[in-house]
Image (cartoon, rainbow, N blue to C red):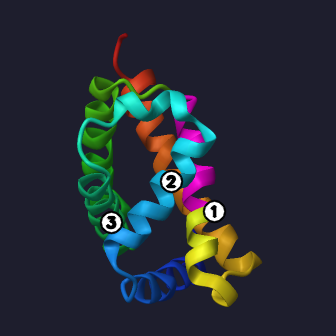
Amino acid sequence: MTQDEILLIKASWKQLQKIEAVLIGDAFYSKLFLEAPYIRPLFKSSRVEQGNKLIATLAILVKQLEKPDQLTHAIEQLAIRHVQYGVKPEHYELVGNTLLWTLGKLLGNSWNSALQQAWTNCYTALSGTMIRAAYVSTPQ
């Protein structure tokens, strides 16, 4: 990711923090379960709790964007936990598309091609690290 992309993501995150976490989580999980109802059983906690986890994870990610080496271990551990939940490599694209859709809806007129590309690059790096940690680096 470029420094400009990091700045775009951080600025958009400041905007998102003005929105109640429950609304962000509800938008995300409503869209996710609409697109892929078959993955609903992977989520054992309430939608509110899941939304809070999503926001907490994104907050850590955004805060550490400029320190990817410090972030890598946490991402790898997150990936390993996701395998235990039943997450498959193909779920990452679905989640990424849902995240981008959610960000676009919530950021409204602030959402543009540069911001979309920045978040896409961020999620691509994140999901790539998670997939490698969970499905490539460890025997299945």
In the displayed structure, 81 sits above or below 97; it is above
In the displayed structure, 139 sits above or below 37; it is above
Q: Nearer the viewer, residue 125 or 56?
A: 56
Horizontal and vertical percent position of residue 23? 40, 71
Work out whether mark 3 precedes mark 1 in sequence or the reverse, and give the earlier one.
3
Categorize mark 2 by other alpha carbons within 10 Å: few (<14), some (14-19), many (20+): some
Horizontal and vertical percent position of residue 123? 53, 56
Tell me how far mark 2 sits from mark 1, CA to CA.
11 Å
Horizontal and vertical percent position of residue 48? 28, 58
**Mark 1 and mark 2 in contact (Cβ < 8 Å)?**
no
Q: Quadrant of residue 19?
A: bottom left
- Quarter of the image that includes the N terminus: bottom right
Q: Tell me the magenta residue range.
A: 89-100
Element assignment for label 1: helix
Residue at left offset 34%, top offset 58%:
54
| Residue 131's disc number | none
Element assignment for label 2: helix
Q: Is 98 a magenta residue?
A: yes
Query: Please, what is the three-letter code of the amino acid marked with disc 2?
Result: Ser
Q: Is 90 a magenta residue?
A: yes
Tell me how far mark 3 sits from mark 1, CA to CA.
15 Å
- Comparing labels 2 and 1, the label whose residue is closer to the camera: 2
The residue pinned by badge 2 equals: 30
In the displayed structure, 91 sits above or below 67; it is above
The residue pinned by badge 1 equals: 101
Query: Please, what is the three-letter code of the amino acid marked with disc 3?
Result: Ile
Residue 118 seen by the camera: yes
